[in-house]
Image (spheres, rainbow, N blue to C red):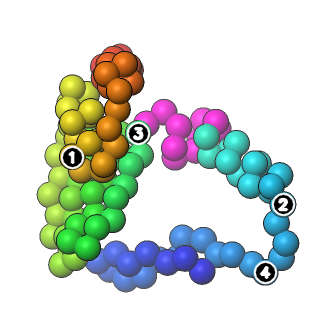
């Protein structure tokens, strides 16, 4: 069982069984998560980075930094800020072409 701790307790994310899995099993889940309109991962950016002193999260335009004592700061991010924020907070460096495409996509 994979659990995550939040301010108000532990929450179960998902469990692994002992039954044998095949590549096709993962392909179906991956296809759903990456293409289905009701997937939480399509149509918006979802990025998280846990570090010892904070967890940085970007969901859509909402950036949140949460500390181990559960204090947090949150703000809305303008599309022009995405490339720099992805690099400084998440360690994701985009090429100039990808950065421009990301900003353009989120301005529409």
Vertical side of 62 occupied by 26: above or below: below
Q: Mark 1: give few (<14), some (14-19) or many (20+) Cα within 10 Å.
A: few
Q: Is residue 64 visible?
A: yes
Residue occupied by mark 3: 45
Residue occupied by mark 4: 18
Dot 3 or dot 4, earlier in sequence: 4
Q: CA distance from mark 4 to mark 1?
A: 39 Å
Dot 2 or dot 3, earlier in sequence: 2
Q: Mark 3: give few (<14), some (14-19) or many (20+) Cα within 10 Å.
A: some
Residue occupied by mark 2: 22
Q: Mark 2: give few (<14), some (14-19) or many (20+) Cα within 10 Å.
A: few
Vertical side of 50 occupied by 95: above or below: above
Residue 8 place in picture, x, y as percent = 32, 80
Q: Are marks 1 and 2 in contact (CB under 8 Å)?
A: no
Viewer-side label of 2, 3 = 2
Residue 34 place in picture, x, y as percent = 61, 40
Dot 4 or dot 1, earlier in sequence: 4
Residue 101 place in picture, x, y as percent = 38, 19
Q: Are marks 2 and 3 in contact (CB under 8 Å)?
A: no
Q: Quadrant of residue 79?
A: top left
Q: CA distance from mark 3 to mark 4?
A: 33 Å
Q: Are marks 1 and 3 in contact (CB under 8 Å)?
A: no
Numbered disc 3: secondary structure: loop
Q: Which residues are magenta?
A: 35-44
Residue at coordinates 33% horizontally, 65% vertically from top-left?
50
As drawn, the label of residue 88 is: 1
Numbered disc 4: secondary structure: loop
């Amino acid at each position: 069982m994979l659990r995550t701790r939040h301010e108000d307790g532990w929450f179960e994310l998902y469990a692994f069984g002992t039954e044998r899995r095949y590549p096709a099993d993962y392909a179906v889940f991956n296809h759903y998560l990456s293409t289905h309109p009701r997937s939480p991962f399509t149509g918006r950016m979802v990025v998280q980075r846990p570090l010892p002193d904070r967890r940085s999260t970007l969901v859509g335009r909402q950036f949140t930094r949460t500390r181990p004592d559960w204090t947090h700061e949150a703000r809305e991010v303008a599309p022009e800020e995405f490339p720099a924020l992805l690099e400084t907070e998440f360690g994701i460096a985009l090429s100039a072409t990808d950065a421009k495409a990301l900003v353009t996509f989120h301005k529409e």
